[in-house]
């Protein structure tokens, strides 16, 4: 992790934002998970993650491949079960129940999105909370809200680790979260609130977004819309976390933040790619090893 850096940079005209390198931080976290995995193996416990992919969505295929590779690198055993898009919802639910009952499986992940004939909420709720390593179950959301042990959703969890890596003290700071999804926006706000930040959640109905972001010490952009945050909307020296995953006119991956211009104003910024993305996968490994450790305790 990055240490010895100024937690609250003062902006000057010639200063560009420092990058929070998600790839480097994720590598460190994978190494930590590998050590914890070895400790469990020494006790006769093989941590295991079951990943389910329904359909042939190209992006989902890439994501699940990365998750399997990341798991293998750390010594975790990851199995990928693929099913055709025509799979009946009842059959998927039956398979999840089997995995819930399998004591050798510590984490279960159903890759989203699911085919339209399936109820994603119903499918996620079928996963046993003790194996909900994606952190999407209602029980996980409730645990986060009341500050009890549970599994945090991987993307906002990764964003919090990025803030930790620069030694940023959130106490009393104003954090603005752009986006109110159950997967990122809402849990992100709760995690920031738990660190004593004052949190504002913005969304498509927010009036004068710019007025709010200009007050923010930390901005988290998580709406899936290009250039939702531009340089004139950022307070000098602010920390900008970009959760977005979009494509620009040339087809290249980009985030929600106008990176090139915002980095001339912000104090810290996460890039896309190479920012929150690899951290999301890293925190899945953390949740999985945590699930295995709880079982072995």
Image (spheres, helix red, strand yellow):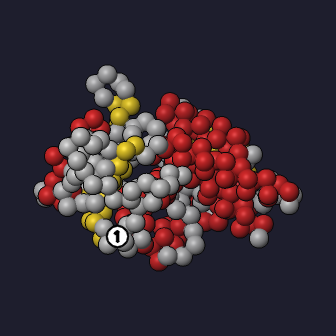
Residue at 16% over, 46% down:
232
Give the residue at the far top of this rendering.
Answer: 250
Where residue 120 sits in the image (x, y, percent)? 48, 52
- Residue at the image position 71 percent from the left and 49 percent from the top: 34
Picture quadrant of residue 216: bottom left
Q: Is residue 129 above or below residue 286?
A: below
Residue for badge 1: 197
Left or right of 248? Residue 183 is: right
Left or right: 201, with 70 as reference point: left
Which x, y percent locates residue 116?
44, 43
Residue 140 shows in this picture? yes
- Sort mark 1 into few (<14), some (14-19) or many (20+) by Cα contacts within 10 Å: many
Q: Quadrant of residue 127?
A: bottom right
Closer-to-camera residue (190/213): 213
Q: Is residue 80 visible?
A: no
Judging depth in this view, the residue of 224 and 219 nearest the camera is 219
- The number of callouts visible is 1
In this image, 143 relative to 216: left or right? right
Residue 243: x and y in percent read 38, 47
**Which quadrant does the C terminus fall into?**
bottom right
Q: Which sits in the foreground, 105 or 155?
A: 155
- Kindly state the secondary structure of the residue where label 1 is placed: loop
């Amino acid at each position: 992790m990055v240490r010895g850096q100024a937690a609250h940079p003062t902006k000057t005209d010639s200063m560009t934002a420092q990058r929070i390198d998600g790839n480097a931080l994720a590598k460190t976290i994978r190494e930590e998970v590998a050590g914890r995995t070895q400790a469990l193996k020494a006790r006769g416990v093989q941590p295991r993650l079951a990943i389910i992919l329904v359909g042939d969505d190209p992006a989902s295929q890439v994501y699940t491949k990365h998750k399997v590779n990341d798991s293998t690198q750390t010594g975790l055993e990851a199995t990928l079960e693929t099913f055709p898009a025509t799979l009946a919802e009842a059959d998927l639910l039956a398979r999840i129940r089997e995995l819930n009952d399998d004591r050798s499986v510590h984490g279960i992940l159903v890759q989203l999105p699911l085919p339209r004939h399936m109820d994603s909420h119903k499918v996620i709720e079928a996963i046993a909370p003790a194996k909900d390593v994606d952190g999407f179950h209602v029980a996980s959301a409730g645990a986060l809200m009341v500050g009890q042990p549970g599994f945090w959703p991987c993307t906002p969890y990764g964003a919090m680790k990025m803030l930790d890596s620069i030694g940023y003290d959130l106490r009393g700071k104003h954090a603005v979260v752009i986006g109110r999804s159950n997967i990122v926006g809402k849990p992100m706000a709760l995690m920031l609130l738990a660190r004593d930040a004052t949190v504002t959640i913005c969304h498509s109905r927010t009036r004068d977004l710019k007025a709010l972001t200009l007050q923010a010490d930390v901005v988290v952009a998580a709406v899936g819309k290009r250039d939702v945050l531009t340089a004139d909307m950022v307070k000098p020296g602010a920390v900008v976390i970009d959760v977005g995953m979009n494509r620009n006119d040339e087809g290249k991956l980009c985030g929600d933040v106008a990176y090139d211009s915002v980095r001339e104003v912000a104090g810290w910024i996460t890039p896309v790619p190479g920012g929150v993305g690899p951290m999301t996968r890293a925190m899945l490994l953390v949740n999985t090893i945590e699930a295995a450790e709880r079982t072995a305790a």
